[in-house]
Amino acid sequence: MDLEKLFYPSSIAVVGASPNMGEGKLPYYQLLKRTGYQGSLYAVNPMHKEIDGVKVYPAIDDLPEAVDLAIVQVPVHRAMETLADAVKKGVKFIHFFTSGFSEVGDIELERAMINEARQGETRIVGPNCIGVLCYESKVTFNPLPKQKGLGKVAFLGQSGGVSLNFLRIALSRNIELNKAISYGNQIDLGAHDYIEYFGKDDNIKIIAAYVEDVKDGRAFINALKAATPKKPVVILRGGITDQGARAAASHTGAICGSNQIFSAVMNQFRCIEVQTIEQLLDVVVLATSAKTPQGPRVGFLGAGGGTSVLFSDLAALNDLPMPELETATQKRINEKIPQVNTSVTNPVDLGAYGRDFNIMLHAMQAMDEDRNLDVILPFFYLEYTRVLSPDQLRNIIGLIIETSKEMKKPVIPIFTKFTENDFQLEENKIKIFRAFRDADIPVFGTMQDALYTLRAMLKWKKNSN
């Protein structure tokens, strides 16, 4: 399915546009003007003559052209007549923000809409969704924050709320987006259409998705088969329990099939399946980093025997081997520390010397030369940063980042804090994580998050080779 004119429309009509940015609507017309959309933009609403001095058209039929995209915010009882007008006018895509369809039991209305759309070539997005976002064309359902460049991430979400939450977390983690679609009840265009389109887009490096149900299983599988050899597809599924399935039915009219079958399909066709939106973003962070792990052999260094033991257990539970370091590596690490209350085999326990960032960097560089390792995970206590001035913190973080960049092996730092009521530590964490993400280096707050994400990415890499 060619969705080029959906994400790059030359003209847009907002049906139901209003000068009042409330009334239970999203201010699509105002957002498109403010974000810099450069195509022809029309407002359609028989209740208004103008918005901000610009003419408002009473109906789609009165527009001077057949637009590429119509965004519809009208009451559900006007959905059919609005669709009929769009089909008659030759509108290419129509997105219904409007709700009140199969999610409340009105399946017949959706069937009638499909029959009407098939009278022409109009394709339907939704209904019951917030629609399209494309950074390059400036089409959006949300204010577009500034990015350094065109992002590498595409997102499709059956829920508008989850789609917005994905964008919020992505922004806070400095993840730059390329495209997103909230597709709701998917009575026409479905998840498979968007995965297929994103899979063919060379500017997109990873596809993330929130899915409640799949309308066309064969088309969905074919889209995955085409996309996953080239880029990871990460899916968070809603409605995996009986209770969740009932919620999904009332949310988007979704009929959720067997979760075991869905997971088997995910595994067979090289998808990464996650259980939370945080895990979804964690995988995106790792996949979009400058250096991604190519193998599973983990090297860990930190301060404290108990921490090393816990990390070793978590690595084993995630099927990530921790081979013993080469003798030359151990000798090089020992140059900086006494052989008392320390261990340099792997995990590397620097003991109290783990508080010394220079020693940590020295150990990281030694491990970078070790032929037994594929990836290095240094562990830092955020509590150690409490005594640092802002300049000291900035300099130390800069050293860790530069060292990580210069190393051949990928580095996945873990910065953990155990104090939960210290605003300074929380501020330091935000600064540190922002600095690493600006440098395209993945960074995590817990060992389990880092290891889970590493395992997920390696599973895709293994299946893709």
Image (spheres, rainbow, N blue to C red):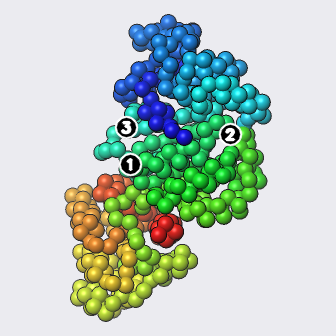
Q: Is residue 397 left or right of residue 31?
A: left
Q: Earlier in the sequence, mark 1 or mark 2?
A: 1
Q: Give the class, few, some or many, for how many residues have Cα within 10 Å of label 2's Cα (few <14, many ≥20).
A: many
Please determine whether, in this image, residue 45 is positioned above or below residue 318: above
Question: Which three-letter amino acid code belongs to the residue tagged 2?
Answer: Thr
Mark nearer the viewer, 2 or 3: 3
Question: Which residue is disc 1 drawn over?
Answer: 203
Q: Earlier in the sequence, mark 1 or mark 3?
A: 3
Determine the CA span between mark 1 and mark 2: 30 Å
Which residue is rendered at x = 42% and y = 86% of the image? 323
Please determine whether, in this image, residue 23 is positioned above or below residue 49: below
Residues at circles 1 and 3 in contact by the CB criterion of under 8 Å: no
Q: Give the camera-side residue of 138 and 188.
A: 188
Question: Which three-letter amino acid code belongs to the residue tagged 3?
Answer: Glu
Residue 388, can we see it? Answer: no
Question: Which residue is disc 3 drawn over?
Answer: 136
Q: Position of residue 200 (x, y in %)?
A: 46, 49
Secondary structure beneath disc 2? helix
Q: Give the camera-side residue of 451 and 226.
A: 226
Q: Position of residue 60 (x, y in %)?
A: 55, 15
Which residue is rendered at x = 52% and y = 68% of the image? 463
Secondary structure beneath disc 1? loop
Q: Earlier in the sequence, mark 2 or mark 3?
A: 3
Q: Is residue 57 left or right of residue 159?
A: left
Determine the CA span between mark 2 and mark 3: 29 Å
Q: Give the camera-side residue of 243 and 5.
A: 5
Q: Position of residue 133 (x, y in %)?
A: 46, 37
Question: Which residue is disc 2 drawn over?
Answer: 252
Mark nearer the viewer, 1 or 2: 1
Question: Which three-letter amino acid code belongs to the residue tagged 1?
Answer: Asn
Which residue is rendered at x = 36% and y = 60% of the image? 289
